[in-house]
Amino acid sequence: MKFGDMTQFSGIGIVSPNFQARRSCSSAWSQDIPLSFREIPSAFVLDHIAAPDGLVNEPVDSIKLRCYNNPSKNLMKNQYFGDINDYQKYGLLRCLSQAGLKIGLCWMLTQNDNSGDGGHIGYAQNPDRYRDHDPELFFALQAALSSGTRHISLAAQPGILPGALSFSDLLTDQASQRFDYFSRLFKALETIDLLFFDPDNGLEIPSTRYGHRGSSKYLYWREVRQAYDLGFSLLIYQHFPRVQRTEFIQRMIARIRSKTWPKQRIYAFQAKWTVSFLAGQSSHASRIQAAVDLVRQSWSGLIHIVE
């Protein structure tokens, strides 16, 4: 089975709670194969699970799956898992969760670009300097790195982001696929309070047009506005470009405000190589303020808050 193949499995199978169930939009299925979930090779990730009558929540006679063969070699973000940026990113999300916000994670997974990024893991060998920001998170990431396992699916494990809902579909540069991607995202995570976007690079830039080569590495303003209009508070992850950072942060805060018109303050959480922008809904104001206070208390020295 090749990467992205659509295959129909028949027989009794138990749906894993770790994967998001949804109706498939594809009508092109291969022949029935008598196979249960337990017989599916561990190299496959069951990404989409659907049945003729809609969402799967119990044993069924026929299910349809999209499988990704050996995803650790095919998807971005696995190569970054557990680095210092993740420690800070997950720490921020944990503060938002501890303040009572239900978190949704849009990983915006893309094909691996075979770059050498993801090597900033020395912090895990320096507990005296980094551990006290969030000891539970520190030791969970340290254990993952020590085991040699770097995979985004580990983000849902205890000690990292338990309880968060993840959307792990592959995002491509194709405009039609991207539109469908975000439609599925908003449906799958409709019950959450705060939606975290994790693009490879960050918010859109003029030189990379929507639907063109490289566009999968960016979040576009139309998607920011759509998500905010649907009632989600937003946390957007951004790698710093090679510009003056203070001016860049202020410029992006102004642009986010112009696109969402939030009644609440926009926060920027600045780390060494990245910044995360938070645009909250009015209904989430007290919980967001509690989360900001937690970040100030726990992450001073690693995360600087810009208001």
Image (tube, rainbow, N blue to C red):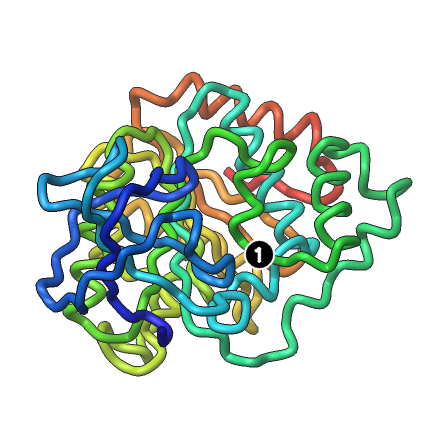
Placement of the N terminus among the 4 image quadrants:
bottom left
Q: Which of 279 and 180 lies nearest the eye of the viewer?
A: 180
Asked if residue 283 is positioned above or below residue 59 in the image, the reply reads: above
- Which secondary structure, mark 1? loop
- Residue pictured at 38% horizontal, 38% vertical: 104
Q: Is residue 91 left or right of residue 77?
A: right
Asked if residue 14 is positioned above or below residue 6 in the image, the reply reads: above
- Residue pictured at 22% horizontal, 75% vertical: 174
Q: Is residue 284 left or right of residue 259?
A: right
Estimate the x, y position of residue 187 in percent, counting from the top left.
20, 41
Location of residue 103 by image quarter:
top left
Estimate the x, y position of residue 257 in percent, counting from the top left.
31, 45
- Residue pictured at 10% horizontal, 45% vertical: 52
Q: Which of 217 and 293 lies nearest the eye of the viewer?
A: 217
Residue occupied by mark 1 = 151
- Residue pictured at 43% horizontal, 40% vertical: 18
Q: Which of 236 and 154 lies nearest the eye of the viewer?
A: 154
